[in-house]
Amino acid sequence: MKRELLFDDGDRRWVYFGRDPERPDTLIDTNEYLVIHGDKAMLPDPGGIEIFPQVAAEVSGEVAIENIEVLFASHQDPDIISSLFLWIGVCPGVRVLAPWTWTLFIPHFGSARPVTGIPDEGMTIELGKSSDIRAIPAHYVHASGMFTLYDPRAKILFSADIGAALLPETETDVFVKDFDRHVGYMEAFHRRWMPSNRAKNAWIDRVKDLDIEMMCPQHGSIFKGKDVERFLGWFQDLEVGNAV
Ligand SMILES: [Fe+2]
Ligand SMILES: [Fe+2]
């Protein structure tokens, strides 16, 4: 898998893994991110069962697996959290956070262990000795209960399926290089998988004044600098929910 260090200030680190060349093309490609604070770690949207061995191998190169303190599920989709029981198997003490709407659904991925529900308004997430990372509501963008994550220290917005792009195999850049061309890879996804213009615009209002250096989606390339603003402007103008 490709690896990229996104942020490191000595205490906090964000590491990206993705574009697994061995992934069968029957599976949507996913980005994995590892957030480390001190010696504790969080995996936002740890991914599906199929990619668990590759992700676990990459993660264990960065931090001791038993130091993963939090698994965060932005929503209930299989590409987000179907690896749940495998992660619980290797780090039994891990705290699993998910939108409260999905806490009785997600354990069907193979663990009857309780999942901590994030209330609709969001919450701050404790990681190691820190408590500055926030779960920001993104309900109906696209799941009915959904959260993105904002790290004010790293100035990183983890945007889950928002900003997702379905890239051809020839596009291997970790970061968006040409925004206008990138629109071609994400427009159909956003129009179909995002059901509500009102919800989309409410999420944009929640994040638009945040200081964001990188917006990190769960599929496709990472938006950096001006491309974050470009994305929010493009998304604001997009009509979604087009399957009727
Ligand atoms: Fe999803
Ligand atoms: Fe997804």
Image (cartoon, helix red, strand yellow):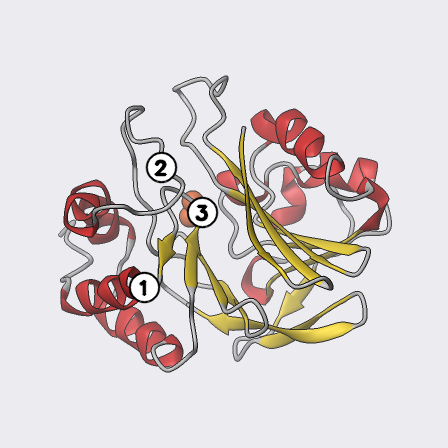
Q: Which residue is mark 3?
A: 218
Which disc, if any, is residue 244? none
Query: Residue 15 appears at what percent x and percent y?
Result: 59, 48
Q: Quadrant of ligand 2?
A: top left
The residues tagged by marks 1 and 3 sit, at their Cα atoms, a distance apart of 15 Å
Helix, strand or loop for disc 3: loop
Marks 2 and 3 close (CB-CB < 8 Å): no
Res. 123 in view = yes
- Between residue 18 and residue 125, name the one nearer to us: 18
Amino acid bearing label 2 = Asp
- Between residue 201 and residue 101, name the one nearer to us: 201
Residue appearing at x 25%, y 74% in the figure: 198
Q: Earlier in the sequence, mark 2 or mark 3?
A: 2
Q: Is residue 236 above or below residue 84?
A: below
Marks 1 and 3 close (CB-CB < 8 Å): no
Residue appearing at x 82%, y 36% in the figure: 90
Q: Earlier in the sequence, mark 1 or mark 3?
A: 3
Q: Is mark 3 within 8 Å of ligand 2?
A: yes
Q: Is residue 165 above or below residue 235?
A: above
Query: Residue 21 appears at what percent x and percent y?
Result: 47, 20
Q: Which residue is mark 2?
A: 173
